[in-house]
């Protein structure tokens, strides 16, 4: 039996982890990820970039929905806002990509106030529908405000140099996405161990008690909207670097549903869960594609004709299955497994 | 002793129902003050107005020179009012420590940016808050539970954590709505002892709503009795025990 790990001082209790084993694993994981582009081909690398960006977006959504309890179906709208901000600033206004990426976060955060303020009195399903409507308004605007957004023609960005990286090279784009993901994880974990994160969860768990404890619902719900959409906007900005040619079709309803699926499957309210969920939901159709190569040709053809429907179906299935077996998501399964092994053989 | 809290001709109507009707009383600083009365008498409604969850229909509530009836709910913690709820209102997924830390919210300053960076002042204030919370944990004798999710604890212990969270606010006035209902005799005695210590050692004024006459008569300095929303008696435990209107309200309507 492995003995438990005990923490003696408050200083140490505040630390994200004091367990040397955890540090070692985190270091090894990061090193492995940094070397990843040297080990795999372009196809896997572009899948990994998609996973990374999805993970950043999922962490953003989880701050709002998992942590603060405000359900959002507006992910596509905030991603679109961030993506177009970066793309247009670089393509039409000649901004450096570094600033254009930051701007994506700020524009998206400001837009979230437009929906956050009227949403203060809405809960659950009503909020979900409002965010959905918001998302449609954004994409509608992007499609029809042609003078600003190029409307149906989309936006092309070129010459992407970011702090010395050439983002048209997949490996260098991967490193940027990885760096942004690491920063996002750190910021989210930090937020969660301070009064701000505690205010978010208090609002989710018992909003009357939260108010009586001195937490202003207005202020902290808006803060949750802003932080969340800042992060999602950054993810959108990275999408502009990834696709380099963007149009509104990238930001459909399925994107919002997949984002929700990521945090439900991965674990509501968990930063690590958001990442696991992003990995799972992005890889799911990839895995199915690999499997269908083994199927009869007729079936393969049908699956590729209905690729959009199949993805929707898989996402729905993943949500239902996960809610049945472990409402805490993949991260819950992981914790159970860990508890089992640390307490073995007492755990049987 | 001067009044820390005064209730001045306070009424509350919900549609056609008058839940609280022209109630006035004053709670002296340093007192343990009980509000009693049959079910539906308006006790919780009165508490909800003192914690600014909703304003009175008429009348004024003045705490420490401040007009509570015009305050916003989240301002009350800073004014110095902490409370517990009749129905448990803990954050059940969070640990004991995290629950108490929420009570310290108004005493901390980190904003979005400094919290995300967790540098300098943000880090130092978290450390100080952890120390303060640990004092409350010691005071309430729940050291062994500190890192457990509160939802896993027994009802009595969850109430105790809720009391701790209200203390973490650093209140001058503590409102306790039926702390001991649903507790066994031993837990009730613990709570009575804590309430006395809170007043004597921490100097906090306590207003409590209770149905348990044992604890009310034992530890209260003064008692207000509500019936159908109206104040029918106010005085020391001995005066209340002998009051014909109170006996009438409790023992029958003949
Ligand atoms: N928000 C509300 N809306 C409408 N009616 C309410 C509301 N809150 C309380 N009431 C009514 O006001 C009356 C007083 O209720 P209150 O909860 O204050 O009683 P109480 O003295 O706390 O009773 P108990 O001992 O059962 O807790 C009751 O008739 C109750 O139904
Ligand atoms: Mg009540």
Image (cartoon, helix red, strand yellow):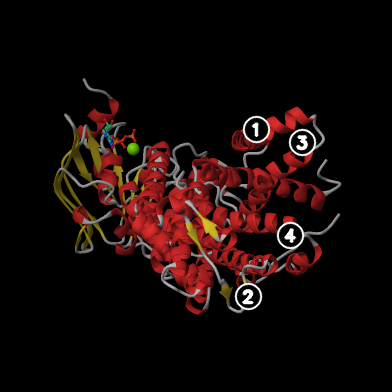
For discs 2 and 1, the disc positioned in front in the rendered view:
2
Note whether residue B96 is visible: no
Q: Tell me, yes or no, whether dots 4 and 1 are on the same chain.
A: yes
Label of residue A324 in the image: 1
Relative image position of residue B216 (x, y in whole percent): 36, 44
Q: Residues within 10 Å of mark 1 (few under 14, many from 20)?
A: few
Q: Which residue is mark 4?
A: A42
Marks 4,2: beta carbons within 8 A: no
Residue drawn where x is 40% and y is 39% of the image? A129
For discs 3 and 1, the disc positioned in front in the rendered view:
3
Q: Which residue is mark 3?
A: A292
C-alpha span from label 2 to label 1: 44 Å
> From the viewer's perspective, is B140 left or right of A175?
left
Q: Which residue is mark 2?
A: A165
C-alpha span from label 4 to label 3: 21 Å
> From the viewer's perspective, is A346 left or right of A220?
right
Nearest the viewer among B208 and B254 is B208
Q: Residues within 10 Å of mark 2 (few under 14, many from 20)?
A: some
């Amino acid at each position: 039996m492995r003995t438990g790990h005990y923490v003696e001082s408050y200083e140490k209790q505040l630390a994200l982890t004091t367990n040397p084993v955890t540090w070692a694993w985190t270091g090894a994981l990061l090193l492995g990820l940094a070397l990843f582009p040297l080990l795999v081909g372009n196809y896997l690398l572009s899948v990994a970039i998609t996973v990374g960006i999805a993970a950043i977006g999922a962490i953003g959504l989880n701050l709002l929905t998992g942590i603060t309890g405000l359900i959002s179906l507006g992910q596509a709208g905030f991603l679109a806002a961030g993506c177009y901000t970066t793309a247009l600033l670089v393509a039409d206004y000649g901004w450096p990509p570094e600033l254009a990426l930051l701007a994506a976060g700020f524009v998206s955060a400001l837009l979230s106030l437009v929906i956050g303020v009227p949403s203060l009195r809405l809960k659950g399903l009503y909020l979900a529908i409002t965010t959905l409507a918001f998302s449609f308004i954004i994409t509608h605007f992007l499609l029809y405000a042609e003078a600003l957004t190029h409307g149906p023609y989309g936006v092309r960005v070129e010459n992407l140099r970011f702090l010395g990286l050439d983002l048209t090279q997949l490996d260098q784009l991967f490193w940027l996405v990885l760096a942004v993901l690491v920063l996002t994880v750190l910021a989210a974990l930090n937020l969660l161990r301070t009064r701000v994160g505690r205010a978010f969860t208090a609002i989710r768990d018992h909003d009357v008690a939260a108010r009586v404890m001195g937490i202003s619902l207005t202020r902290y719900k808006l803060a949750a909207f802003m932080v969340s959409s800042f992060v999602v906007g950054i993810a959108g900005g990275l999408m502009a670097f990834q696709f380099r040619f963007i149009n509104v079709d990238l930001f459909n309803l399925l994107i919002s549903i997949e984002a929700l699926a990521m945090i439900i499957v991965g674990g509501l309210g968990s930063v690590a869960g958001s990442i696991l969920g992003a990995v799972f939901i992005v890889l799911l159709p990839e895995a199915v594609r690999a499997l269908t190569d083994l199927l009869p040709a007729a079936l393969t053809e049908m699956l590729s004709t209905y690729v959009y429907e199949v993805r929707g179906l898989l996402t729905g299935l993943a949500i239902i299955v996960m809610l049945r077996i472990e409402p805490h998501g993949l991260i819950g399964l992981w914790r159970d497994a860990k508890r089992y092994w640390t307490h073995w053989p007492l755990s049987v | 002793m001067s009044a820390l809290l005064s209730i001045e001709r306070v009424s509350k109507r919900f549609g056609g129902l008058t839940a609280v009707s022209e109630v006035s009383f004053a709670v002296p600083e340093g007192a343990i003050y009980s509000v009693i009365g049959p079910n539906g008498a308006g006790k919780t409604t009165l508490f909800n107005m003192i914690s600014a969850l909703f304003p009175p229909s008429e009348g004024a509530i003045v705490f420490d020179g401040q007009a509570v009836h015009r305050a916003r709910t989240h301002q009350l913690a800073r004014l110095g009012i902490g409370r517990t709820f009749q129905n448990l209102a803990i954050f059940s997924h969070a640990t004991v420590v995290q629950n108490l830390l929420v009570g310290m919210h108004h005493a901390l300053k980190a904003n979005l940016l400094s919290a995300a960076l967790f540098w300098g002042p943000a880090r130092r204030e978290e450390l100080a808050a952890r120390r303060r919370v640990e004092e409350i944990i010691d005071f309430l004798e729940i050291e062994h539970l500190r890192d457990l999710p509160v939802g896993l604890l027994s009802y009595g212990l969850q109430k105790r954590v809720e009391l701790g969270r209200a203390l973490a606010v650093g209140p001058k006035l503590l409102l306790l709505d039926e702390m001991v209902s649903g507790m066994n005799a031993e837990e009730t005695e613990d709570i009575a002892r804590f309430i006395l210590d809170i007043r004597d050692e921490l100097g906090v004024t306590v207003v409590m709503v209770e149905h348990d006459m044992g604890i009310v008569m034992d530890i209260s300095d003064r008692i207000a009795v509500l019936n159908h929303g109206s104040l029918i008696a106010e005085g020391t435990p001995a005066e209340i025990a002998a009051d014909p209107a109170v006996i009438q309200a409790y023992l029958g309507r003949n």
